[in-house]
Amino acid sequence: MDNRMLYPIKNLSMACALTATVALLSACGGGGGADTKTGFGGTGDPPPPATALTAAGPLSAVGVAAIAATGLDDRASPIFINTLAGQSFNALKLGMVAEVTGTIPANSSIAAAGTATNIIVQSTVVGSVSSVDIANQRITILPVTVQVDQNTIFEGISSLAGLSAGTRVEVYGLPQPEIRTALATRMVALPAVAGAPVELIGTATNVSPFQFTLQGVTVSIANLTSVITPAGVAQGTASIVESARVRVQGNYASGSNSLLATQVVTGIPVARNDNTIIVLDGIVQSVSASGRFRLGDTDVETNATNAASATVGARVQVKGQKTAGVLVATDFRRVATGERLQYVIQGEIAGFVSSANFTVRGETVNASNATFVGGTASNLVNGRAVRIKAQVNAGRLEATEVSFVTS
């Protein structure tokens, strides 16, 4: 896979589902001016036959759900976030970690459009900060150590310096090889609420009728009569079984390192079946041989020329087909150490203060050094539809390009 990423080139009605930024700008009416609405591929022709796809990783674009090198039109997809079903696509934010099922055109190229049919978003942890390590850019929340890097998006704070013990936060992140550690892709400072529940996701172990262990925390389920699933409420707790992936919400007692569950979510893994296209963005957990490694919970192999760069702890993006339980990655890319990823947001400007301070889809943007397409900085006004390419600088989105979208 090359360094290009797929991003949305569509107006707010989402008529043009997806394109490669550098390759297909003109296909959606972009050219050198403002983006305009077109049909599929700019021709109005019906889409080609579709094949099943699953994708998992941080959202690199909103306005269309994009993970790694694949984007999926999210207009009609059911969206489940943490414990809540029926969420709007407007609730999706950059850096949220999502598991998406959908379809893409059969024999698709890098520029092919896709459609999401189900989106499940889960944050890693919600709770109060217990320690802040500015020197190493780490914080601890409950039993989880959270690492920050150059691509972490901050919301409600400008840096880790804005946090202190007791600050309530929500972290979206990728599991790292070290036990109970995560790389933060989005960190949100939450309002202080007395008695607010904590939330934690992981694999249930030591399961018994009344309790289990999650991320080293003892979880009591004695008071539960049902669990939540993306499909609805299920009576009883029989779905909490050994090695099941679960999310727990409840009251945490730090002295005993225990949690009294008030809600448990089960049924959240997305099945990654053989003979389907799979896209993953994650951190290598282990390596068995050059080009053979475990990414999250999936075994991957690739014969890419740079396959040896898939070392333990490396962030990589892969795409391929799963065969006999192994994802054979035909597209492979390692995110270089210190590399700043490109994000894309599309929506209407709000909260405009200046070109260095406005919001789109709830994201605060600084466009003071951006290149403008189809207009100038003077056209940045509340209500104007834009598509923004951006990178993270000190936790804040700095636009590299702003395109004005027309209907």
Image (tube, rainbow, N blue to C red):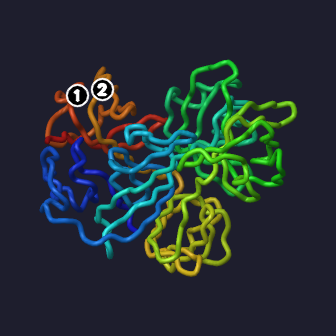
Q: Quadrant of residue 127?
A: top right
Which residue is situated farthest in the right direction here?
256
Q: Are marks 2 and 1 in contact (CB under 8 Å)?
A: yes
Helix, strand or loop at mark 2: strand
Q: Is residue 62 left or right of residue 370?
A: right
Coordinates of residue 22 in the picture (x, y in percent): 25, 58
Residue at 70 percent of width and 24 percent of height: 166
Residue at 29 percent of width and 23 percent of height: 352
Q: Is residue 386 left or right of residue 242?
A: left
Residue topped by disc 2: 350
Residue at 26 percent of width and 33 percent of height: 348
Helix, strand or loop at mark 1: loop
Compare marks 2 and 1 and give the one earlier in the sequence.
Answer: 2
Residue at 34 percent of width and 26 percent of height: 357
Coordinates of residue 228 in the picture (x, y in percent): 61, 44
What distance separates the C-alpha of mark 2 from that of mark 1?
6 Å
Relative depth, front residue between 206 and 397: 206
Residue topped by disc 1: 383
Number of other residues with Cα within 10 Å of mark 2, as a class: few under 14, some 14 to 19, many 20 or more: many
Number of other residues with Cα within 10 Å of mark 1, as a class: few under 14, some 14 to 19, many 20 or more: few
Relative depth, front residue between 52 and 344: 52
Q: Quadrant of residue 358?
A: top left
Which quarter of the image is occupied by the C terminus? top left
Q: Is residue 165 left or right of residue 315?
A: right
Coordinates of residue 89 in the picture (x, y in percent): 38, 42
Q: Amino acid type of disc 1?
A: Gly
User: Is 61 located above or below residue 372 in the figure?
Assistant: below
Coordinates of residue 223 in the picture (x, y in percent): 77, 36
